[in-house]
Amino acid sequence: MIEALVRPVGPYSLRLSARREVLETALPGGGVGAAWQGRDGTIALRAPDEAGVALLRFMLALDDDTTEFGRRFRSDPLLGPSIRELSGLRPLRLPTVAQAVLRAICGQLIQASRARAIERAVIRACAQPAPTREAIGRLSPVELRRLGLATHRASALVRLCRTLDLERLRELPIEAVEARLLRERGFGRWSLGIVALEGLGSYRHGPVGDLSLVKLCSALRGRWVELPETAELLAPYEEWAGLAGVYLLAGWRRGLVPGASADVARAVRVAARRAA
């Protein structure tokens, strides 16, 4: 095992980003990485080798300077309170793009707890805590259906893992990745946002259509919105739309988004169901 001390670029809080004081995570090829933040703000990393340390830096977004995001939107009426209160928050990345694709497909249109249960079941079946595309691709659609994935999602996951070099997507412009992934059947804007944020480390795309974002948008508009309308909420933040979505959802959970009461969201949802 080796250790390294890293000074994050820009404001950074491991506690806010990882929701814990010490992060431990599985790494591809075996082994475990760990990270914790000192009082001076530096991040201590521990991994089996230099490649593991480099991957931890990426997974924790330590080299991403989000100062410009904070400067541009700190006074934004909708986003500003969350930025001021949650300075240093950054979305964590998964060790492999393949796992991000797995998470994106598992999470489509079902309850979050159920989606994570299916994701964990698939990872166990891969016998790799940080699954590669090869490991996922060895599973058949029939096996994935037994683990809880719907037929078309199981087929989409296998097809992507068997036909596309997913890890290489980190080397491509996000525009090229967007065009390629959206050609896949059953792969929409929400899934693209998950892969962009958690697999590629891009802040350009957010979780369009996320149920929590639907609730937030509905509370703001006073009516139950359609899934595509959540894209309008993120559009003003342009190349920072994905990070804006992360801050909005984190702020929503803490009551930091002005005019977006959880009580209002529940009321408009009840009204929409009664009107249906």
Image (tube, rainbow, N blue to C red):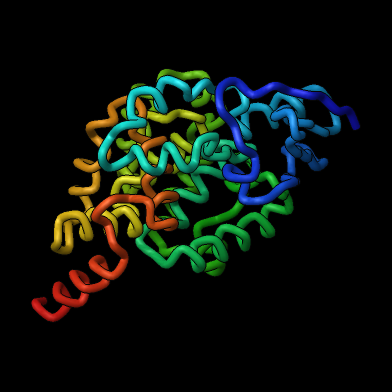
Give the residue furthest to the left. Answer: 275
Left-right relation of 266 to 64: left
Q: Foreground residue, 251 or 121? A: 251
Question: From the viewer's perspective, is residue 45 above or below residue 127?
Answer: above
Residue 21 visible in rendering: yes
Snapshot quadrant of residue 72: top left
The C terminus lies in which quarter of the figure? bottom left
Instruction: Tell me what residue is drawn at x 65 percent, y 55 percent.
Output: 123
Left-right relation of 27 to 100: right
Question: From the viewer's perspective, is residue 92 above or below residue 129?
Answer: above
Left-right relation of 81 to 122: left
Residue 162 visible in rendering: no
Instruction: Tell me what residue is drawn at x 75 percent, y 34 percent.
Output: 39
Residue 115 coordinates in the image, percent (x, y) = 49, 62
Snapshot quadrant of residue 143: bottom right
Instruction: Tell me what residue is drawn at x 57 percent, y 38 percent.
Output: 93
Give the residue furthest to the bottom. Answer: 274
Question: From the viewer's perspective, is residue 241 above or below residue 4?
Answer: below
